[in-house]
Amino acid sequence: MNFIKIILLSILGICFTGCKTINTTSSESFFYSFDKTKIAFTVEGKGETVLLLHGFISNGSSWNKTALKKSLLDKGYRVIIPDLRGNGKSDIPKNKERYKNNAEVKDLIALANHLKLKKYIAIGYSRGSIVLAKLLTQEKRISKAVFGGMGLDFTKPDWDRRIAFADAFTGRKKPDEITKGAIDYAKSINANIKVLGYLQDYQPITSLKELQNIKIKTLVICGNQDKDNGNPKDFKAQLPNSKLVIVTGNHNNTYKQENFSEEILKFLSK
């Protein structure tokens, strides 16, 4: 009897060893946010947590081949990258009501709660910086923040660029020379054009007063050929505890580059 028991335990031991969940450096997962919208995210590495926020007509995978993500992991950070609602592998609600009232910001707070984060760093690029600005007005767990590819224009409720993109993507107006290329690209990757329009309609707006109340250390970093979203110097001027760095690059390539990564790592190390 004892012999049989030993054999059985040995077999079970082999099975549990071979079948248990393997801890890897990367995991793709999802959770249900405040309104039951499914939000996809990845987690890689161990150490101090960094949240990376992607831009418009994009998703979290846009960070995958960047020097920044590689450097963060090499330096021992834990990197969390969500697909913001309406993008990537997250749910893409067709009802415009699901994008109102800073829904993306609420998702990010819910994600931090889901992962039981006590403290983290947040880095945004382009529209990711816009979402991050509003997040900072409501989230006290962020220790440092980086705004990439952004000027001050997003603080205007009637920002003409945002309205032009919202009108073109929702179909309220025909695309013009500014919006046509973006719509063509969105179609080429099979993105939901109307939903992208809703994301512009209900994009978070952070006032100058709210920016001036952000006390944590912040970095504004932008390419020297990038004024798509206004002047980054003006943005920096509204943040009390901020630094401005201009690197070579344009709006579409700066976030991928080594110089962008180097400056951010330098900022985080201080």
Image: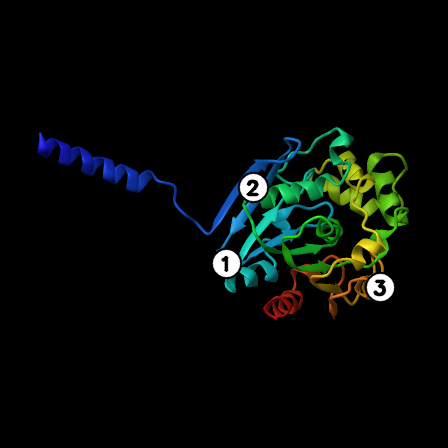
Q: Who's the residue at 51% across and 52% down the image?
A: 44
Crowd around label 1: few <14 · some 14–19 · many ≥20 (10 Å): few
> Residue 113: percent from the left, percent from the top?
58, 43
Look at the image and tell me in which quarter the C terminus lies.
bottom right
Crowd around label 3: few <14 · some 14–19 · many ≥20 (10 Å): few
Q: Which of the labelled discs sits on residue 234, or is there none?
A: 3
Name the residue beneath numbered marker 2. Answer: 114
Picture layout, residue 253 above or below residue 12: below
Q: Secondary structure at mark 3?
A: helix
Q: Who's the residue at 70% across and 31% down the image?
A: 93
> Residue 138: percent from the left, percent from the top?
71, 48
**What is the distance, in whole Å, between disc 3 and disc 2 at their CAs?**
35 Å
Residue type at tag 3? Asp
Along the viewing direction, whichever of 132 and 194 lies nearer the viewer: 132
Crowd around label 2: few <14 · some 14–19 · many ≥20 (10 Å): few
Picture layout, residue 250 above or below residue 177: below
Picture layout, residue 246 above or below residue 190: below
Name the residue beneath numbered marker 1. Answer: 47
**What is the distance, in whole Å, between disc 1 and disc 3 at their CAs?**
34 Å
Residue type at tag 1? Gly
